[in-house]
């Protein structure tokens, strides 16, 4: 645990005693959360090998605050540390930091703008994927919100226009975001080459996003949504052509074909991501279904030689949550993900250490008990076939990944 | 067997008992909740969609541009849960999700939670722009009672 996380935890701890959120002058508040999990993944290494025998190396901490200067003008920010053994190091980062100005608002409509680092509202869960109290289990549905694009899509530095309109009692909400961000490129490297690319460390990501949802007048328990994101990720810090040629000269004869990632001199992905969402509330039940389609054009240079490949990624899930009492809930979910839609067996995406990375199918069962005063405990079990959403970490290429794998998580959460 | 015969004989009694119990269950334990606002608030007859949007923290200001201050009882309280279903037509757990999303994405805030009806009345009385609720039988004074708040 690094020093910064310890200080973040101690700040959080100092807020634990007064259980309600701190209210400060000038319409300001501070809130936070802490989630500590114990994860057992007996079949495949989940974010590292420790999880095979059970590991506590799964922790999320966040603190946020806002100040309202007037009903129209507010600023808000959140720092977050997400520790997932070898997949995420727990470094404290700025999750969002924004100024929000409401141009217009009345009983029927509103329009405003946010400037700064804003969370991207994509589908039902993208903007709250790191918030334990706002997602159904330990993870958001991993098929539609798969890890490879997590950092790329999570937030952006730019401008976000938002609005609501009540049109003949149909409630329409929309957002439009334009921005860019530098992200850690490890997920990108494993997604494209299944191994780390030498000397690359970040990817520059310009993003344009439109999302809209409607709660129709004929059934206010129904919510339908559409999100479309146009995103590009360019790998930075790759080898120069001269460096790659030098590496090739000293390499074993076949290495260029066995380890092409060692000779990458440029790489990027153009993606057009669409998510269609439906959520239906019936009494104590919440049913949700989402479908993802990602059209991607991958282009790269190996020792200066260009090549490109297009693919369609497809995923969906069906989920039912049942709020059994005011304090308890249970959920179940079935989901599928195919990195290449036309290749259901994942043969095209297979690698030597993992023939099953091109697809994923799985069931998840879970439950949550709100103990009170902001505390809750939760547990879930996931049963999977194919590893398209098994988290990558540096070194995963040294393990033989299994096709059928389960994992079990138990978490204690606190929020104020 | 004996029990079954006697139950059949007492059919009308059993039916009455069942009906009474059923009525007791469906009758609002707290009567029709009163929606109360601070006397500064410039509305009197909102429809339920407007109220739903206010309690979902989707509308930040009243028609006169003053800030809306929303007060609620804890999400686990029976009165809160009845209020959300009957007056806002939304389940309490859905509202919780909406508030958590806004709070932890920087796009809004959650209502101020009070621990009792007494505190609710006190806060609504003393906070300009405030809106809250109490149970039907709870005596209120020095606040504005929203009349309609029906479909």
Image (cartoon, grey):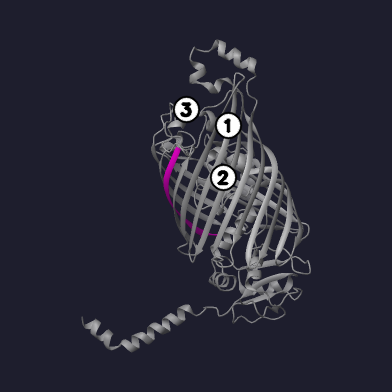
Residue A363 falls inside the magenta stretch: yes
> Which stretch is magenta?
A359-373
The disc, 2 or 3, on the residue closer to the chain's N-terminal end is 2
Kindly indicate whether the residues beneath marks 3 and 1 are on one polypeptide chain.
yes
| Residue A129 seen in this snapshot | no
Up the image or down, A112 lies above or below A219; here it is above
Up the image or down, A140 lies above or below A49; here it is below
What's the CA distance linking mark 2 and mark 3? 26 Å
Along the horizontal axis of the image, is A398 left or right of A94?
left
Q: Secondary structure at mark 1?
A: strand
Q: Which residue is mark 2?
A: A60
Along the horizontal axis of the image, is A258 left or right of B6?
right
What's the CA distance linking mark 1 and mark 2? 33 Å
Q: Check the image and name the residue furthest to the top.
A: A249
- Mark number displayed over residue A93: none
Q: Which residue is mark 1?
A: A298
Q: Quadrant of residue B97?
A: bottom right
Q: Could you say which is closer to the camera, residue B112 or residue A388?
A: A388
Along the horizontal axis of the image, is B3 left or right of B40?
left
């Amino acid at each position: 645990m690094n020093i910064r996380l310890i200080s973040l935890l101690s700040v959080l701890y100092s807020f634990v005693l007064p259980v309600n959120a701190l209210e400060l002058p000038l319409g300001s508040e501070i809130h936070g959360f802490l989630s500590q999990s114990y994860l057992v993944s007996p079949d495949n290494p989940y974010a590292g090998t420790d999880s095979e025998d059970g590991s506590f190396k799964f922790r999320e901490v966040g603190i946020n605050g806002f100040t309202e200067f007037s009903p129209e003008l507010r600023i808000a920010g959140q720092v977050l540390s997400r520790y997932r053994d070898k997949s995420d190091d727990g470094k404290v980062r700025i999750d969002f930091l924004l100024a929000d100005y409401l141009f217009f608002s009345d009983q029927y409509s509103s329009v405003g703008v946010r400037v700064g680092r804003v969370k991207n509202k994509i589908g039902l869960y993208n903007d709250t994927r790191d918030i334990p109290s706002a997602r159904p289990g330990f993870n958001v549905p991993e098929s539609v919100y798969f890890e490879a694009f997590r950092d790329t899509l999570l937030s952006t530095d730019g401008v976000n226009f938002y609005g609501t309109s009540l049109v003949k009692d149909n409630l329409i909400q929309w957002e439009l975001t334009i921005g860019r961000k530098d992200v850690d490129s490890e997920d990108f490297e494993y997604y494209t080459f299944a191994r780390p690319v030498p000397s690359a460390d970040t990817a520059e990501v310009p993003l344009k996003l439109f999302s809209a949802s409607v709660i129709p007048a004929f059934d206010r328990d129904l919510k339908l949504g559409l999100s479309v994101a146009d995103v590009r990720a360019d790998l930075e810090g790759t080898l120069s052509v001269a460096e790659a040629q030098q590496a090739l000269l000293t390499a074993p004869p076949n290495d260029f074909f066995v380890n092409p990632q060692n000779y990458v001199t440029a790489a990027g992905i153009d993606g057009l991501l669409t998510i269609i969402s439906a959520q239906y509330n019936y009494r104590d039940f919440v049913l949700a279904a989402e479908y993802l389609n990602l059209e991607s054009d991958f282009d790269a240079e190996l020792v200066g030689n260009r090549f490109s490949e297009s693919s369609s990624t497809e995923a969906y899930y069906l989920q039912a949550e049942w709020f059994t009492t005011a304090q308890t809930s249970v959920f179940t979910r079935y989901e599928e993900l195919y990195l290449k839609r036309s290749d259901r067996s994942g043969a095209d995406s297979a690698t030597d250490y993992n023939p099953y990375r091109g697809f994923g199918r799985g069931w998840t069962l879970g439950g949550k008990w709100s103990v009170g005063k902001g505390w809750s405990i939760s547990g879930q079990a996931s049963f999977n076939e194919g590893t398209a959403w098994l988290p990558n970490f540096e070194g995963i290429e040294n393990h033989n990944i299994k096709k059928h794998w389960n994992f079990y998580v138990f978490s204690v959460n606190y929020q104020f | 067997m004996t029990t079954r015969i006697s139950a059949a004989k007492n059919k009308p009694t059993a039916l009455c008992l069942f009906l009474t119990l059923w009525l007791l269950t469906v009758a609002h334990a707290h009567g029709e909740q009163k929606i109360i606002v601070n006397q500064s608030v410039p509305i009197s007859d909102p429809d339920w969609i407007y109220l739903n949007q206010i309690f979902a923290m989707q509308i930040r200001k009243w028609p006169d541009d003053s800030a809306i201050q929303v007060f609620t009882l804890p999400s686990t309280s029976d009165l809160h849960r009845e209020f959300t279903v009957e007056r806002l037509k939304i389940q309490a757990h859905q509202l919780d999700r909406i508030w958590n999303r806004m709070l932890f994405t920087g796009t809004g805030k959650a209502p101020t939670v009070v621990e009792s009806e007494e505190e609710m009345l006190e806060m609504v009385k003393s906070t300009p722009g405030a809106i809250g609720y109490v149970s039907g039988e709870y005596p209120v004074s020095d606040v504005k009672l929203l009349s309609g708040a029906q479909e």
